[in-house]
Structures are given as C-alpha cells and as structure tokens.
Amino acid sequence: MSYWRNTIKPLLDDETGTLFKQAPVRVTLAFPNRYSVGMASLGYQVIYRMFNNEEGVACERAFLPDDVEAFERTGQALPTVETGRDAGDCQLFAISVSFELDLTNIIRLLDVAGLRPLREERDDSDAIVMIGGPFTSSNPYPLAPFADVIIIGDGEQIIPVVSEALREATSREDFYDLVDGMPGVFLPARHTHEPKWATAPKELLPAYSQIVTPHSELSNMFLVEAQRGCPRPCTFCLARTMYGPNRNNQAQELLDVIPDWATKVGLVGAALSDFPHTKFVGRTLTDRGIKLGVSSIRADTVDAELAEILKAGGLRTFTVASDAPSERLRRWLKKGITTEDLVKTAHISRDLGFKGVKVYMMIGLGPENDDDITELISFTRELAGINRIALGISPFVPKRHTPHFADPFAGVQVIEKRMKRIQKELRTTAELRNVSAKWAWVESVIARGGPEVGMAAYQIYRNESIGAWKKALADVGWSDEFETNAPAIDLPPGQYESKDVSAHAQGLAI
C-alpha cells in the first residue's frame, strides 16, 4: 500500500492554502516530528511560503511518520506531502526544528529520507542539508555533525540568499562560497563559532500562516504574529535574544493578512498583553465572529476588558505564567509577577465565568529550597479557593544566550522529590501536569552541549531512552561542567558563589 496515498493524501485534501509548484530547484522542507506538530509551527509555514515565492524554486513538505518503525518496514521512500515524490530527491533538504528533544528525530528523519545523516559521509550527489529554527538559535553545536548549513536567527532574511545560491551553485563548495559570511549562516565544515544572527527587518513582518488544516494541533487556526521579540527582562527566557529586538506590528497589518475565510485566529507573541493592539485586534475579530487563540497572558497586565475579549473569542481557561514557585525567586528572575497579580487574575476569571486558570511553573531553580515549594503550595490553595486551578510544572532547564547559561541543572532526584511533595499536598486541590525530570535533564544536556552530544544522539537515534542517553554520553566523554556551580539568591543570575570552578562557571553567558 502507498503510504502517501493512504496516509498523506487524506491530510492534503483537508488543507486550505496549499502551494503547488514545479521549478528547476527542488526544496524539501521537513519537520522532525509528526504532521500535526509541524503544521502548528508558524515559522515552518512562513519558510514554506517564502521558498515557493522564490523564482525558480519549488518547495514541498515532509514529516516524520507517526510510527517510524512501521513505515520503514514498508520499504518505501519518505514522500513529500504535495506530490508524493521522494523527500530526499531535491537540491536542498531543509529542516525546521523547534525543540532540543527532537535531536534524535532529526537524525531519524534524514535516515528515512534516504540521506546519510553524517555530513562527512555526503557528497555532491546528495542534497544539501540545512537546519534552522528555534533550536539552532538556542544552540547550533549538537547539529554540527549532521548539517551542511545551520541557519541562526530569522529565516525571512536568509531564504532569498539561500535561494539565489541554489540557483547559481554548481557544487556544494560553490554553494558554501556563495552563502559564507552572510548573517545567520553557520557552515560547520568551515566555521567553529556561530555567526552574527540574522534579524528580519520590520518590513518583512508580520509572519502569518500559509496553510490551515483540521489536523494540526492548533486545529483550523490561522496564526499571525503580533510581535517578535519581547520587551521584558526575564533572565531565563530566550525571547529577547533569540528573536532579536522587540518589533510590534500595527493592528491593521495583522488584520490585513487574515483571510476572510478564517474562523479561528491565533495571535502569536512572547508578551501579548504588552502588545499595544491586542484589545483592538481581539475585539475586531470577535465582532466578526472569529474565535481567538492566544499564548499565556502576563498576570500583571490582565484586566477585565482583556479577559472579556478573550472570553468572547471562545477562551474557556485563562493561562498565565508564574514561572517560579515563590515571590523571591520571581524577583531573582526579574519576572515582575507577584502573588497578588495571580490572585487578581483568578478573581477576574471567576467573575467572568472562565472554567479555570492554568498557571505555568518552573521548579529546580538554582537558589530554590523547601520554603519556595511551601509558598507554591500555599498560593495554589489560595487560587483554588477562587477558581479551578491547573498547574503546568516544568523543571528549569538553563539555556545558552541567557544569564543562566552556567547554572547547574537541579538534578533528577531533587526535582522528583519536590514534585512528589507538590503532588501529595495538592492532589485534591489542583490539577497537576508535570514534565519528566529525566527528559528535562536530557534537554539540558542538549541545550548546552557541543558536537559530541550530537554524536551521542547518533549512537541511539533508533533506540532512544534515558539509559541509552547516559551510556552514549559516557561513550563520547561528555561531562557536566556546570554541576558544581552554586547560584545564590543574593547574587544576580549568572553569578556564582566562589568554588573551584571553570571560567564558564564564573557566570560567562555566551
């Protein structure tokens, strides 16, 4: 049976906005996860449209099958969505990746597309492999063994450069020559350090969806980017650095790109309640009968007017971020959210008839102790006395390009112990949704690792597990250079109590 005809074609038939094009230069834009996840990525859709807007370039999509083992047993080549051609039969095999934990999926994707995963094993007869997305901006180095080109920063500035090079190049080295030195272009075969990031000029924004489908995780939702970057100083977040300076789009710019047929619109931005036009755009869309989707709203900027607009747009649960379990840790992170802000939000949500409030939370921060967890439990009980509460709890993962780059990972046992206490004391008070501490540890390794972490992933990409990761990391000689660092609440993030530590461990954030 044809995988494309039986699995992909039904998805294709339900899409609105699909682009069909034939051209001399063929690009496959792949996503290292299932279709529903990839089609919820705004950046992935923007790059798809931009490649197809280039003269002489045709771009088709490909996704990792839901069941890779079952797909491999069929003996078929991975097909593209639009025409079912072999995904690896192209001049450029581009991968958009959002999450560190998709590292092994990237290798698997190359494999099932018929491409040798290791860069050094490919030659001019193979497609050029280009990898971009939030993961590469956060930390490109684990991808160096696999990518010919790594894109860092905004794709809008880079796609025209890459497309021109594809049209003109006669060999892989010729292609490298044409893109070498451009902002955001990292060539692992030639470079040892990441370049200056690419930053899209304002005239290339806003980003918006190309395809709407009921089979996306954001079903039938048209996405439009209200802002890029973030004006807030939160020290743990990559939004300010990874997405460049804060760039707000004008209200009419957003409304102009939303098609008349859209029934659900998702506003995208790191700090939507800081975006000056959220209320106007939201009210305009709800007056047209359009449902709204938003990411989390800052609790310190929530008011009844904004909540009423979101409720009119179909929102049933209010989502805010505390990001730390106590007031003192939120101040340390420069989060700017108080318990009073969270309580106010709970009252507004109850008064307007929202079904509940979801609060995002991190635990495992450097100076965290049992008193901070006690405060989390206490204010959760207070919130639950006002409205139904769901806690989304994630272990803190230090990231490059933030002051927390050299913070230690709290440790699986520490996080699991604190999680068990929270679950025990709040099991009848709040709905709890937590992220695995063990997989958060793997994420932390990838988030700060180098090419050796990529090679560890290569060892296990067919049989990934926590145990396999530990063994593979030991095999490549990885060690945690940050584990002895000791952040303190009376020191700014990125500064550590003096111990016998490395230069990185003295707070060097790169």
Image (spheres, grey):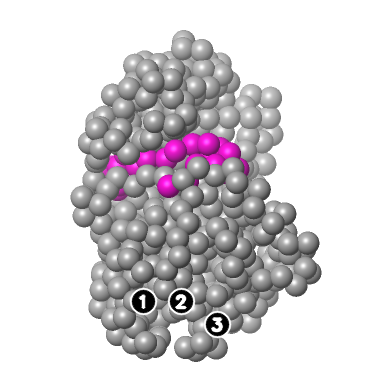
Mark 1 → mark 3, Cα distance in angstroms:
21 Å
| Mark 1 element type | helix
**Measured from the top left, where is residue 109 in percent x and y?**
60, 68
Percent position of residue 29, x then y: 48, 63
Q: Residue at x 49, y 79 (%)?
A: 127
Q: Callout 1 environment at 10 Å: few (<14), some (14 to 19), or many (20+)?
A: many
Q: Position of residue 344 (x, y in %)?
A: 40, 19
**Residue kind at label 1, given as amino acid type:** Leu
Cβ–Cβ under 8 Å for marks 2 and 1: yes
Q: Is residue 251 magenta?
A: no
Left or right: residue 322 compared with residue 247 = right
| Alpha-carbon span between mark 2 and mark 3 | 17 Å
Q: Residue at x 68, y 25 (%)?
A: 428
Question: Disc 1 marks which residue?
Answer: 166
Q: Is residue 106 above or below residue 260?
A: below
Residue at which label 2 appears: 91
8 shown above or below 423: below
Identity of the residue drawn at 24% across and 41% down: 248
Q: Is residue 121 above or below residue 494?
A: below
The residue identified by callout 3 is 118
* Location of the C terminus (image quadrant): bottom left
In the rendered structure, the answer to whether residue 246 lies left or right of residue 422 reads: left
Q: Amino acid at mark 2?
A: Gln
* Dots 2, 3 in contact, CB < 8 A: no
Judge whether residue 69 can be spotted in this image: no
Q: Is residue 3 left or right of residue 22?
A: right
**Does label 2 or label 3 sit earlier along the sequence?**
2
Residue 326 image offset from top left, x and y in percent: 45, 36
Magenta stretch: give its range.
Answer: 210-236
